[in-house]
Image (spheres, rainbow, N blue to C red):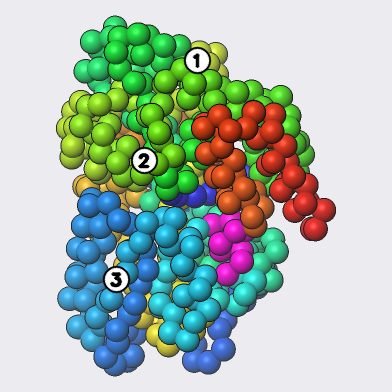
Amino acid sequence: MRNRTRALLVSSAGLALTLGLAACAPGSGSGSGQASGAPASTDVAKAGQVTLTEWDQDTDPVRAKVIDTLNKEFEAKHPNVTIKRVSRSFNDLKTTLKLALSGKNPPDVVQANQGYPDMGAFVKGGLLRSLDDYSKLYGWDKRYPSSLLAINSFTPDGKTWHTGNLYGLSERGEAVGVFYNKKILSDAGITPPTTYDEFAASLPKLKAAGTVPIAYGDKDLTMGIHLYGVVQASLAGADKVNDLVYAKSGAWTDPDNVKAAQVLQGWAKSGYLTDGANGVSEDQATADFGAGKYAYEVDGPWEGGVLGKAMGTNVGFNALKPNASSAGPVTQGGVSLAWAITSKSQHPDVAAAYINFLNDDHASKEMAEAGLLPTIAPKGYAPQAGTLEADLVKAWNDVAADNGLVPYLDYTTPTFYDTLTAALQNLTDRQTTPEQFAQTLQGDYSKFKASR
């Protein structure tokens, strides 16, 4: 999963530039970001023989292959470095990373989820190193727009997001949308939906034609966030969702948020989602969709490589506009988990060089060719028309053009991931009502706001 800009998420200008426009100067706020000890350096060789341990969540075959390839290339470029890779699922990474960072021998480089629950907590605990000095040294502050850098920025006390020091860098862009099976839709006489209204209207038609519409597996506690978030964004709009997640205004008990819960529970009751979804993993749901068992999968570009390989030209992708009169799509998204340097790493210069390597033009090209969506497109990148890659790029740009990107909802409070994911499982399993679901979220939200 993925993950995003809080204060207003990625601005339309900032997001659009990630696919070809010129980057603006960063504005991540105060804080020198200088660590104690020797000044930051780009000289990897002077570190001597180094084993650099990195933890990531790139477990699917396509992303794993890209990371493995880049790791080997980095080792070839720097013969004094051996990379030890530890890969865990998103949920496993969330549950084990804090303990690992607090231990005596933490990894050097980790993928940290943005927002208060993870990155904010790690910064507050002094577990991550500021990257401000390396940002200037490598020119990240020129390559990336301020809106993207802000997603990975916190004040040193971990209390305020979107300002302060830079603590990570993200190599891929994310906008949640609808993957669709072209043949299934064509056989059912359905045009690939470009709006939420069209998508919702197609579900009973597909069910009547004998197809369970949506591949859905929430065992890993992420697909529920994506599916509910797409419905909520279409019903409430970007401004309301942004204001809610950023604690500016609104409540989880507001009508649009309750209505989104009613819709999601209604889809589960009507058999529009995978049966027993709370026991199905995201990887399994993706594999089943890729095998042609479902018409749709509501997910993000991180699945593009797997689905492109499995389905070829039979898969497409759209980010949804709320309705036909809407200017552009409105959906969750942002950037992938941030590559961060742990505060106890004995080799921060090597770690920074590794992060820079994963985010340079060569790495972006490797990702694009694998069907993934790099945050900053490599020079001259132009995906072939009619391909899934072209759909993903178009969706990323279309969302940016009308400032339609909203944050992942689990960023709302330090405890919101656990609260939201449990509530979503209860909602789709019909253990709670939509109103109870909203009250549960509001309880967590109110407690957080009162503590600020």
What residue range appears in magenta?
Answer: 114-122
Classify mark 3: helix, strand or loop. strand
Mark in front: 2 vs 3: 2
Where does label 2 land, which residue?
280
Q: Residues within 10 Å of mark 3 (few under 14, many from 20)?
A: some
| Outermost residue to the front | 431
Q: Residue at x 42, y 45 (%)?
A: 219
Kind of residue at badge 2: Val
One can see residue 240 in this view: no
x and y, in percent, of residue 197 in the image: 50, 15
User: In the rendered image, which quarter is residue 390 located in?
Assistant: top left
Query: Does the magenta segment cover residue 46?
Result: no
Where does label 3 land, which residue?
85
Residue 9, above or below 436: below
Asked if the residue under mark 1 is in contact with the one under mark 2, i.e. CB atoms within 8 Å, the reply is no
Q: Mark 2 to mark 1: distance in Å? A: 27 Å
x and y, in percent, of residue 231 in the image: 54, 27
Q: Mark 2 to mark 3: distance in Å? A: 27 Å
Kind of residue at badge 1: Asp
